[in-house]
Image (cartoon, helix red, strand yellow):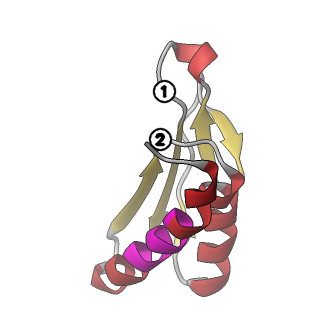
Amino acid sequence: RVRGTDVGRLAALQRELIEGASPLLRSGGVLLYSVCTLTTDETLAIDEWLAAAHPELEALQAPGHPWQTVGRGARLLPQTAGTDGMYVLRVRRP
């Protein structure tokens, strides 16, 4: 079980995973970041960090309804679709 105190550690791990994956993207390659959480640290903060750390990666269009745009990505609320809460962000190397 994940506790609120784990969020910072998990967000740091997610940044490490993105750092490891982003250099592997070829031209036109897409990185999909997806988490089943709604915390700011693991969603919008990751998006903001990624935009600053890798400005060469361009965000792709977020999914439409029932997803809600958040930053350059989108979230799905549990009450909207009867699922877990989720966040997705797609970026591409030009």
> Is 69 situated above or below 12?
above
Q: Name the residue under label 2.
A: 36
Question: Mark 1 near mark 2, Cβ–Cβ under 8 Å?
Answer: yes
Mark 2 secondary-structure assignment: loop
Q: In which quarter of the image is the C terminus?
A: bottom left
In the rendered image, which quarter is residue 80 located in? top right
Q: Estimate the spatial distance between the alpha carbons at disc 1 and disc 2, rounded to whole Å.
A: 7 Å
Q: Mark 1 points at which residue?
A: 84
**Residue in the foreground of this view, choosing between 22 and 85:** 85
Instruction: Determine if residue 93 is in view.
Output: no
Magenta extent: 10-18
Crowding near the residue tagged with mark 1, few <14, some 14–19, many ≥20 C-alpha atoms within 10 Å: few
Pinpoint residue 41: horizontal percent, then vertical percent.
Answer: 66, 60
Pinpoint residue 13: horizontal percent, then vertical percent.
Answer: 45, 72
Pinpoint residue 57: horizontal percent, then vertical percent.
Answer: 52, 76
Pinpoint residue 67: horizontal percent, then vertical percent.
Answer: 59, 30
> Label 2 amino acid?
Cys
> Is 30 situated above or below 70?
below
Q: Count the numbered circles shown.
A: 2
